[in-house]
Amino acid sequence: MAIPRRFLPSMSLLTAFEAAARHESFTMAAEELSISQSAVSRQIRLLEEQIGSQLFVREKQTVRLSEAGAAYAREIREALNRVANASLNLRANPHGGTFNLAILPTFGTRWLAPRLSRFLDRHPGITINLSTRLSAFDFRTDPFDAAIHFGDKPWAGTEGVELMAETVVPVASPAFLERHRIESAADMVQLPLLHLASRPDQWERWFAAQHVEVGRLRGMLFDQFATAAQAAGSGLGLALLPAFLIEGDLKRGDLVAVLDAPMLSEQRYFLIWPMGQGAQGPLKLFRDWIVSEMG
């Protein structure tokens, strides 16, 4: 359904308002936009008349955002950023589609990046932009077409396709294992354990699977697999890490599997996107490709 034009202020009015709102000064906005202060003031008045709300409180020689103006400024700033990003993407790739993907850091660097050239070779007209996100976000305000998500299911307002399950293995550096003799899971309880913030109960679940009773487990906490793997490789402790993300570390001998005791994680990896947007061209091509790569 087309939006009535009376609800669509011109870009000049919106950019003047955004600059004035950011500075809370018509004079500074005028300097930024290279127009006169009176022109900014006039544009703000026109915008207020068009939307029927007072955006600024005028007090002698100063102005400040009204409550409604502050809320409107946040929305307009996000909208202008989306327009700017769309224009930048089109300028960078005028003949093909652009695909903005939110990735989990270690998944992106260790699994996706080494394989991405195969997708780009197959679809040279598509530009992929990658940004890391560690937690759920709102597709309505963040400029992403899709995201790599680890969890029980796609989060609210999205749909997706399951990519893979995850098997974790206990690992440590060769030097650490030289200092600590480990013959069973029970030998590990009192040793330094490295924990992941995204999987806070993972060690407890692993020990339970090995039929070892534990109390409260302590140790260093990490927000990313890469830093936990680096810490384990440096001999700081035992880490429980996804096998597919540390294949290189195991082959090089930087990390060694402590016991033959893998555990299947309760959660899984998904490619997700906003509800109803799955038919988008670049997204559909990427979805088909990554599913085949996982297979």
Image: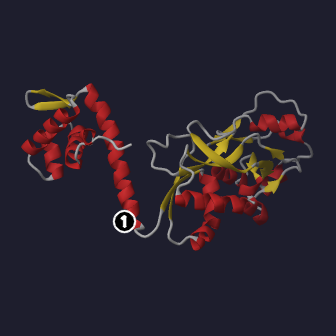
- Residue assigned mark 1: 91
Characterize the local packing of mark 1: few (<14), some (14-19) or many (20 or more) Cα atoms within 10 angstroms: few
Q: Quadrant of the C terminus?
A: bottom right
Q: What's the residue type where badge 1 is placed?
A: Arg
Decide if residue 32 is on the left or right side of residue 274: left
Above or below, comparing residue 193 to residue 57 in the picture: below
In which quadrant is the N terminus drawn? top left
Q: Does residue 58 sit above or below 273 in this rendering? A: above
Q: Residue 17 location in percent, x, y?
A: 21, 41
Residue 190 can be seen in this image? no
Tell me if 137 is positioned left or right of 16 in this view. Answer: right
Structure colour scheme: secondary structure
Q: Which residue is depicted at the point 92% across and 46% down?
A: 183
Task: Answer with left or right where residue 44 lies relative to residue 135.
Answer: left
The answer to whether residue 119 is above or below residue 147 is below
Numbered-mark total = 1
Task: Give how far across and how far down residue 105 sits, in percent.
Answer: 59, 52
In the image, residue 129 lies at what x, y percent? 49, 59
Residue sitting at x 13%, y 36%: 45
> Compared with residue 71, is residue 292 higher up or lower down, i.e. above or below?
below
Element carrying mark 1: helix
